[in-house]
Image: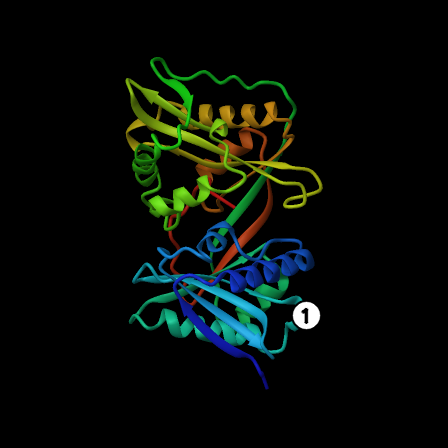
Amino acid sequence: MSDVQIEVVSGPLDGATADDVRLLAGRAAQEDGTAPLSEQPLLWLQDDEARVSHVLARREDALVGYAQLDLSLTATARGELVVDPAHRRHGAGTALLDAARSLAHAVPDRVLHVWSHGDLPAARAFADAAGMPAVRELWQMRLEQDDTPRDVPLPAGVTMRTFVPGQDEEAWRRVNSRAFAYHPEQGRMTKADLRARESEDWFDPDGFLLVERDGQLLGSVWTKVHAAGEHGPAPVGEIYVVGVDPDAQGLGLGRALTAAGLDHLAARGLRTVILYTGAENEVAIRTYRRAGFAHASSDVMFGSDTRRSPIGATMAS
């Protein structure tokens, strides 16, 4: 019998509770070798504009588990869940999942999807016992590079420059939403989401490169640097987002932008580079393999239905 108490919070968490969630996630990451919560849920912990519910599992007033549910869509509720390693297999995960299901099903016919980062066997077993098959897979791909410039040329009339904070946000969001119109997360990035990332310590406009023709934004590559310890003992670079306006497809901009991002990271001394893309996105995977990337690990989404979305993106850890 579980003695877990569940609390559901709508709206931002207070500072102390948010810190408890981060510490809990850190303990789980140390135990499992992979972060249990991705970037967006962590940014939403104290975001008063985020349309999420926070599910807190406590035992004797101690936080032993946490789930966050994105309730902004009517067809699907997407969540992430973590249980303290010292309190696993004692009902906290089941209690969190039951609460998440209740929240999701408050809208008729809405289904629940839950991410598992790292595709851990224990998470597979938990999802199987809960009757939730895998409905989506996100690959992390990894590259070991040297400092040889790739220097892939841009098409005639296309120029590249760095992102200017306070100037380029709306143009970038417009192109990003067009480039990722099919994507349930990246294509819905709001002003608040973008501002939150610009406020992060890792944000560097010099690593955020835009391509234009006649003053019209055509696409971008956004890079990120992970501190030592996040993805290994040394800092690791990331091709965070590559997006090209659909009207500019076929010009070779995706390849040129990826190369420019890799050159920027190499110039900063980053030899290991990662990116994320949908496992079903064969075109993107072929492109990244030609650039030297190889499959390193997977995140898996489990759901109560078996519908698969045509998701494929280079996006955000």
Task: Pick out the residue farthest to the top.
Answer: 156
Task: Indicate the quadrant containing the N terminus: top left, top right, bottom left or bottom right.
Answer: bottom right
| 138 is higher (above) or lower (below) than 80 | above
Give the side of residue 44 with respect to residue 171, left or right: right
Give the side of residue 1 with respect to residue 12, left or right: right
Q: Residues within 10 Å of mark 1 (few under 14, many from 20)?
A: few
- The residue sitting at 39% across, 49% down in the picture is 185
- The residue sitting at 69% across, 59% down in the picture is 31
| 176 is higher (above) or lower (below) than 303 | above
The residue identified by callout 1 is: 86
- The residue sitting at 42% across, 69% down in the picture is 9
Determine which quarter of the picture holds residue 11.
bottom left
| Residue 216 in picture, x, y percent from top left | 28, 24
| Residue 300 in picture, x, y percent from top left | 52, 56
| Residue 283 in picture, x, y percent from top left | 44, 36
Task: Pick out the residue farthest to the bottom.
Answer: 1
| Residue 241 in picture, x, y percent from top left | 45, 37
Assign a secondary structure to mark 1.
helix
Q: Name the amino acid, label 1.
A: Ala
- The residue sitting at 58% across, 76% down in the picture is 61
Is residue 3 visible in this depiction of the protein? Answer: yes
